[in-house]
Image (cartoon, grey):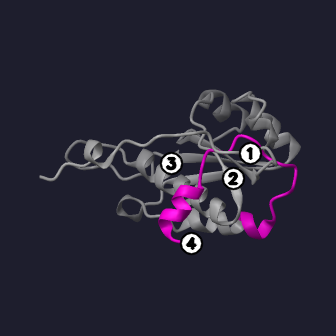
Amino acid sequence: MTFQQLAQKRYSVRSYSDQPVSDEQLNYVLECARIAPSAVNFQPWHFYIARTDEALEKVRQTYPRDWFATAPIVIVGCIRHDQSWHRPTDQKDHGDIDIAIATEHICLAAAEQGLGTCWVCNFDASLCHQLLNLPAEEEAAVLIPIGHLAADAAPRPTTRKPMEEIITEI
């Protein structure tokens, strides 16, 4: 499969089966996140894996949607702002960029493994921080449900802007 085919295969899955994700599949996906590039190679991320009933219940409270509750695993991607690179000229924190790169590595690796994922950023980050008792320096930035697709899972129709709207030669 080419990279473009893999990128086209990945979509936001909102329906998961109860088939368990193997440790081998999960470890492969997490290794792909581990090797993701980051600004100055600081790797300012930390991932929490919720797969026990107790952990999943906590995470699900932060985003109470029926479809979200079908995922057998949720990865909580956090930014370590005390470890992220800050651009010297304006102190821009690149932690958001770094966690986004690592998260997309997770989503693409999962798609390659035949698993589904969905970026979830519309969750109660403060409640997540509290319920998971995260360290003060960590920000819960993204929830990534991961699992095997349910029989009724299908991509929603999406459109992409044409190249001429997003590319300008200078």
Point out the tag, 2 or 1, that comes first from the N-terminus: 2
> Could you tell me how far apart the alpha carbons at marks 1 and 4 are, in whole angstroms?
21 Å
Point out the tag, 1 or 4, that comes first from the N-terminus: 4
Residue designated by label 1: 153
Q: Nearer the viewer, mark 3 or mark 2?
A: 2
For the question of whether residue 152 can be seen, the reply is: yes
Residue type, label 4: Met
In percent of width and height, residue 50 lies at: 76, 48
Residue designated by label 3: 80
Residue type, label 1: Ala
Q: Are marks 2 and 4 in contact (CB under 8 Å)?
A: no
Q: Is residue 98 left or right of residue 9?
A: left
**Front in this rendered view, residue 3 or 40:** 3
Point out the tag, 3 or 1, that comes first from the N-terminus: 3
Point out the tag, 2 or 4, that comes first from the N-terminus: 4
Q: Residues within 10 Å of mark 4 (few under 14, many from 20)?
A: few
